[in-house]
Amino acid sequence: MARSGRSSRFLIGGSTCCWVLLGLICLALADSAQVKERSPTILAGNTIQAVERLFNQVLYATIEDARQRLPALPANETIDRQYFEELDLVAGNEDYYSTAFYIFAWINSDLMYHKTPDKLLVEVLPGEKIAIRRFFAKVKPHLTKYLRLSRQDRSELVSNVTQLATETEDSLITTFLEFPQNLKSQLPELQLMDYTKLAQALVQGVASGIWTKA
Ligand SMILES: *[C@@H]1O[C@H](CO)[C@@H](O)[C@H](O)[C@H]1NC(C)=O
Ligand SMILES: *[C@@H]1O[C@H](CO)[C@@H](O)[C@H](O)[C@H]1NC(C)=O
């Protein structure tokens, strides 16, 4: 394919990207140390569904915002349109959102590695932070209800979530990306879908399509 030369940039062409991949893989590996079958109770299942829905809304909103800003930006200031187009072709919830999670991490990679943000990130960041704060505000009642009904106490987690609902620092972005993992480390039964699925597949060399073309 004519465009495949460009796509390799995304996977191997920049150190930033490799760092994103490594960062996501660290999350995934920390995760696999305690992989267990996902067999939630109805209560846990309902909570997982609610949290996933809210988490996915942030990914979706940020990616759509970024997608709409691409045409107005110089080519060297944006990630490739192609990855957004590819996302549209992904079927299956977990495949879709693990791809969205990967693109989301890519958009935010300058922040995660303390570099000067590119124009795309500068433009999406304010809206993204609002969406993430709203996420934490909306997750809190689901979490407190779950803890009450399952008779558990995770007051530090709840107070962190409360605080994150008003957080303005850039660290909010990384905290958001790490949230599924953090939640699971606190409450193993609340295991969300595997958002690092695409990142893991890339490292294992099993992902196909534009993600792996050299
Ligand atoms: C993109 O190109 C412009 C003009 O050449 C330059 O000023 C800017 O720093 C470049 N941006 C990146 C992220 O390389
Ligand atoms: C709460 O936030 C603090 C400070 O960011 C962090 O060190 C701690 O691990 C968090 N605890 C939980 C349960 O999320």
Image (cartoon, grey):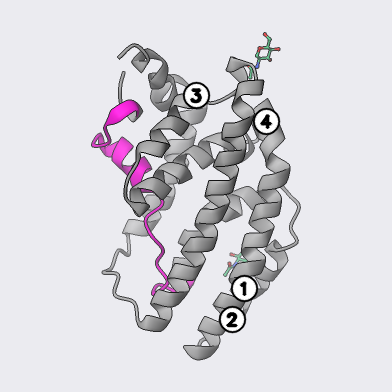
Q: Contact, CB < 8 Å: mark 3 with mark 4? A: no
Q: Are marks 2 and 1 in contact (CB under 8 Å)?
A: yes
- Examine the rendering and report whether any part of residue 80 can be seen: yes
Does 83 lie within the magenta span? no
| Residue 40, above or below 61 | below
Q: Earlier in the sequence, mark 3 or mark 1?
A: 3
- Name the residue tied to disc 2: 144
SS at mark 3 in the image? loop
Q: Which mark is residue 140?
A: 1
Distance from disc 4 to disc 2, alpha carbons, whole Å, reads 35 Å
- Identified at 60% across, 26% down, the residue is 70
Q: Nearer the viewer, residue 192 or 187?
A: 192
Q: Residues within 10 Å of mark 3 (few under 14, many from 20)?
A: some
Which residue is denoted by mark 3 in the rendering? 80
Q: Nearer the viewer, residue 145 or 17?
A: 145
Type of amino acid under label 1: Lys
Q: Residue type at mark 4?
A: Pro
- The answer for how far apart the CA atoms under marks 3 and 2 are is 40 Å
Q: In this rendering, which labeled residue sits more in front, label 3 or label 4? A: 3
Q: Is there a contact, CB below 8 Å, between mark 4 and mark 2? A: no
Residue 50: image location, x then y, percent = 49, 69
Q: Which residues are magenta?
A: 185-210
The answer to whether the residue bearing label 4 lies less than 8 angstroms from the nearest atom of ligand 1 is no
Residue 117: which numbered mark, if any? Answer: 4
Name the foreground residue: 146 vs 2: 2
Name the amino acid type tagged 2: Thr
